[in-house]
Image (cartoon, helix red, strand yellow):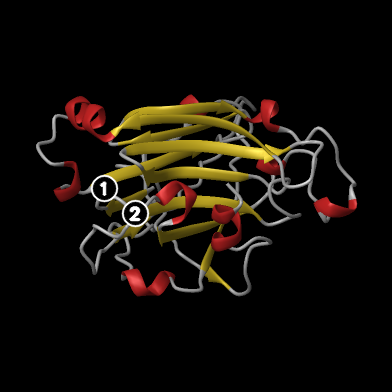
Amino acid sequence: EVRARLKTLNGLWPAIWLVGGRGRWPSCGEIDMMEYYRHKIHANVATGTARQKKAKWDSASIRVGMLQRLTGLLDFDEDWHVWRMDWDSQWICLYVDGHVLNKIRVEAMENPVVGMPWQNGAPKNPFRASHFLILNLAIGGNNGGDPSNTPFPQRFEVDYVRVYKKVPSVKTPAGKSSPKPTSWPSSFPTQSPVIPTPAFTNHYLTVHPSMSSSPTSTASPTTSPQATFTPTTGSPSKSPTESQAAR
């Protein structure tokens, strides 16, 4: 879950996205929790195909004006928005401000071939493996468009990044699984970390899918934050610039 504010102007290409840690793009997998360009908000998932550097996309988009009416906001650019992903063994669900933008079956996003030299060890299903989380603001490019009439400097502001982990079922004395707890242990922080935007420069957050049976069992992010952020050393198998330039 990411709370952020962005400007929807020509030439700007902000993104909250994840790329797989095993193999080369697109066989390593990509999840776009949010992309903005050319007056639309996008929520996408990509995997590999039998052709090198050719991705298979499950994409959804909505015009900013339509999303503004849907959320009842007067000015999309001036408001903060919560971008959320529920990711388990069955589904990847992408939201903004509580509204579903895209819902993707994990099983449907397997790589059709594996073991090719150009895949560099990518798994059969990249969405059953860890990914890096990246937040960036690109300028221009094929998707971003012409920024020449947009005033600068511009900002992509991030209030917080939260990562959640599902609580496993608790065994009762009779050996039966009790219902999943509705609240988190009191030892977890009650306040989310506020991470300054510069902290994301050259840092990557490793995110693991939660191997639960149903996305409906995901704990509510508004009441159940684990609130952990651990930048990793190194970098994903494909840089943000390379991946965005490939589209």
Q: Amino acid at mark 1?
A: Thr
| Marks 1 & 2, CB-CB < 8 Å contact | no
Instruction: Give above or below for 178 relative to 115.
Output: above
With respect to residue 190, does 111 lie above or below? above
Percent x, y for residue 183?
Answer: 37, 40
* Residue 12 or residue 48, whichever sits in front: 12
Q: Which residue is mark 2?
A: 11
Residue 233 as seen in the image, left or right of residue 163: right
Q: Residue at x 74, y 55 (%)?
A: 24
- Tag on residue 8? 1
Q: Position of residue 151 (x, y in %)?
A: 20, 63
Q: Residues within 10 Å of mark 1 (few under 14, many from 20)?
A: some
Query: Which residue: 55% across, 60% down?
Result: 240
Q: Position of residue 187 (x, y in %)?
A: 38, 58
Which residue: 44% across, 61% down? 228
Q: Secondary structure at mark 1?
A: loop
Give the label on residue 135, or none.
Answer: none
| 160 lies above or below 145 | below
Which numbered mark, 1 or 2, is in the foreground of this view?
2
